[in-house]
């Protein structure tokens, strides 16, 4: 006889389901019969497409998470965010400079931050969101870029912000400014890109592509990493 699985009672868009307790929210939705065509992305916690809001029975507190990596809990009430409308300003990275004024021009709402820290509490990657916004306010784009590096652009931070800040877009601008203007250029990388453009690496690329996937993973995991 198969071992009985521990089950959890959850509510998806208000409808009650009993699902295995070890499932993620995404797997539980599919177990319940939902066919996910949008908002499921990479299914591995990297793309940020499956932003989800939920609360637990008996509590009025709202939690955020990625459906692909958040496990279900008993009495969980779930609602997914199909797409969060972040404000993305248009700019030419070649015409703007790494100066504090650029944030004031493109994302002035960051200076309306009330310091509530709701963005940090909502972050699915456990980033210190309020702190990297503070760096952006001061024009410290290098620190903002470093602190926001693991952002997956899910928008959960912005969904809880009373000031209407589009944190992921602010961080993306900081990383672009940092990468183009502040970080030192790596000459061997520049040389390698030129070699690729000239077709000098085509044979090596084809050889790599001929390997089975397991071999490619092994080569990647054992590669020399620049310090």
Image: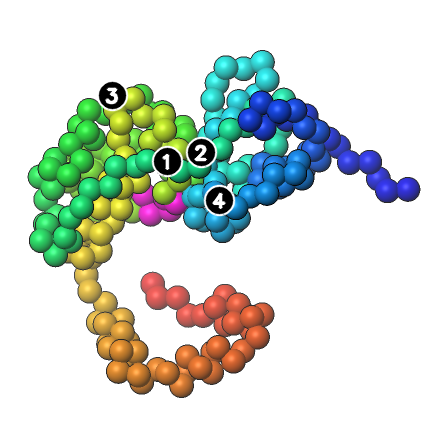
Residue at x 41% of width, y 79% of height: 205
The residue wearing badge 4 is 38
Q: Are marks 1 and 2 in contact (CB under 8 Å)?
A: yes
> Mark 4 or mark 3, which is nearer to you?
4
> Mark 4 or mark 2, which is nearer to you?
4
Q: Nearer the viewer, residue 226 or 1?
A: 1
Magenta region includes residue 157: no
The residue wearing badge 3 is 114
Q: Quadrant of residue 26?
A: top right
Mark 2 closeness class: few <14, some 14–19, many ≥20 residues within 10 Å: some
Is residue 57 at all visible to an observer of this figure? yes
Badge 1 or badge 3: first in the primary sequence: 1
Q: Secondary structure at mark 3?
A: loop
Q: Label 1, label 4: how many angstroms apart (C-alpha)?
A: 13 Å
The residue wearing badge 1 is 84
Mark 1 closeness class: few <14, some 14–19, many ≥20 residues within 10 Å: some
Q: Label 1, label 3: how many angstroms apart (C-alpha)?
A: 21 Å
Residue at x 23% of width, y 72% of height: 190
Q: Are marks 3 and 2 in contact (CB under 8 Å)?
A: no
């Amino acid at each position: 006889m198969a071992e009985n699985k521990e089950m959890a009672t959850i509510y998806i868009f208000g409808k009650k389901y009993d699902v295995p307790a070890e499932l993620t929210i995404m797997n539980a939705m599919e177990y319940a019969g939902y066919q996910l065509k949008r908002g499921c992305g990479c299914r591995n916690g990297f793309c940020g497409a499956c932003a989800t809001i939920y609360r637990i029975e008996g509590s009025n507190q709202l939690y955020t998470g990625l459906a692909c990596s958040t496990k279900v809990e008993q009495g969980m009430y779930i609602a997914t965010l199909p797409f969060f409308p972040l404000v993305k300003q248009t700019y030419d990275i070649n015409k703007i400079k790494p100066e504090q004024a650029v944030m004031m021009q493109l994302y002035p709402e960051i200076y309306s931050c009330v310091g509530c820290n709701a963005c940090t509490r909502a972050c699915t990657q456990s980033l210190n969101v309020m702190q990297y916004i503070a760096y952006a306010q001061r024009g410290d784009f290098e620190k903002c870029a470093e602190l926001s590096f693991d952002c997956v652009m899910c928008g959960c931070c912005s969904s809880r912000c009373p000031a209407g800040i589009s944190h992921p877009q602010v961080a993306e601008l900081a990383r672009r400014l940092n990468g183009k203007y502040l970080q030192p250029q790596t000459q061997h990388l520049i040389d390698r890109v030129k070699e690729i453009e000239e077709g000098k690496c085509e044979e090596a690329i084809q050889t790599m592509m001929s390997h089975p996937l397991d071999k490619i993973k092994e080569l990647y995991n054992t590669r020399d990493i620049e310090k």
